[in-house]
Image (spheres, helix red, strand yellow):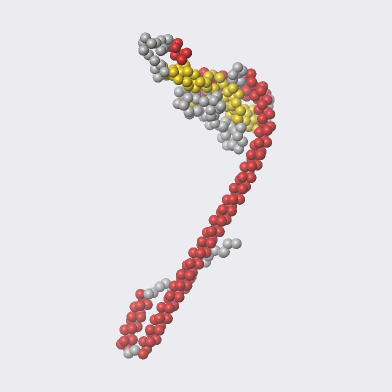
Amino acid sequence: MGLLNSFTSGRVAGDGYLKPVKRNLPDLVVTEPSLRRAASILQKLANRFRDANFRISVACGDDGYTRKALGDEEGRLKRSVFETDIWSPGRPTLVFIDEVAIGLSIYEQTVEKEMVDLDGQYLPVKEARKIKPGLWNKKTGKFYRRSLQRVPSKRLCLRVYSPHPRVSWAYTWTEGKVSLLRQFDDIIAFLVDRAKSLVLEIKEADLHAAEERARWEAERAEAVSRHERSLIIQAREESRKKLLNIIEAWGHEKRLQEFFDEISTRSLDMDSEARAKLLTKVHEAKSLLASPDSIDALVSWEAPPPKPT
């Protein structure tokens, strides 16, 4: 109850729903006229749970619980198309029943009403007639267009849900002829019974998640193994190509050396002047076709990794 100022000190949506700047607040999605009653209901519900040795609290930031966002809620919270941004707390409000957490949200129901745009402000037709009794007066010639819109009804709803990400479940109590306070016995009995089956669903979901995790890790390990194998095969192929290039270069160098040796041998039968000119050309040719030493190339060659099994 001491946090009500935090609700009213923030912004207000066009249809009256409060949008506090602070987010570490109880899960109350209401208008200001319904705020105190909604907080009182949550407080009294917490007292009833405390009497049954259960507790209500706002979740811690690192406990893994998530709040189920409010949607249309079977039409109970369907709002005007111009008001789609609903405030939500940063952390869910939870009741712990035998260590099983169940999320709680109290919100104000909307109803469809006939509204009229009165000087830029939408008001219910009944209220607008009180402000300006002469609406639709044929003599003055004024005409006010009516339209059906969703507006807050001051009737509160209690929505309970599973805050566990792997288990999806929700249920809502609505105030009609009976207030939420008069439904407390049914609410508490329902939640105590639901907690017994919910704990089994959570365990089954956790087991399924663990199996999925193990399957994912196995598939990931297999993918990593395939990737590493492909890298080894690629490295061996590149090493093989480099070695073949070294061998090919060595063979080419050997053929050139044999060619020049053959020329030098034949030059022995030539006169000294002609032989000197020929040997000069041999020397120039060798310089032109000079290539890295094959032994140095083999020394710098990197041996491939072992062949994968």
Front residue of 125/92: it is: 125
Report whether 228 appears left or right of 205.
left
194 over 253 or under it: above or below: above
Indicate the quadrant where residue 282 lies: bottom left
* Residue furthest front as drawn: 138
Residue at x 33% of width, y 80% of height:
281
Say whether residue 6 is visible: no
Front residue of 167/105: it is: 167
230 over 141 or under it: above or below: below
* Residue 181 x %, y %: 62, 19
Q: On the rendered image, what quadrant is the N terminus found in? A: top right
Front residue of 257/216: it is: 216
20 over 209 or under it: above or below: above
* Residue 309 x %, y %: 60, 62
Residue at x 66% of width, y 23% of height:
186
* Residue 283 x %, y %: 35, 79
Residue at x 31% of width, y 84% of height:
277
* Residue 28 x %, y %: 55, 25
Say whether residue 213 is visible: yes
Residue at x 40% of width, y 83% of height:
261
Counting every numbered tag in the picture gives 0
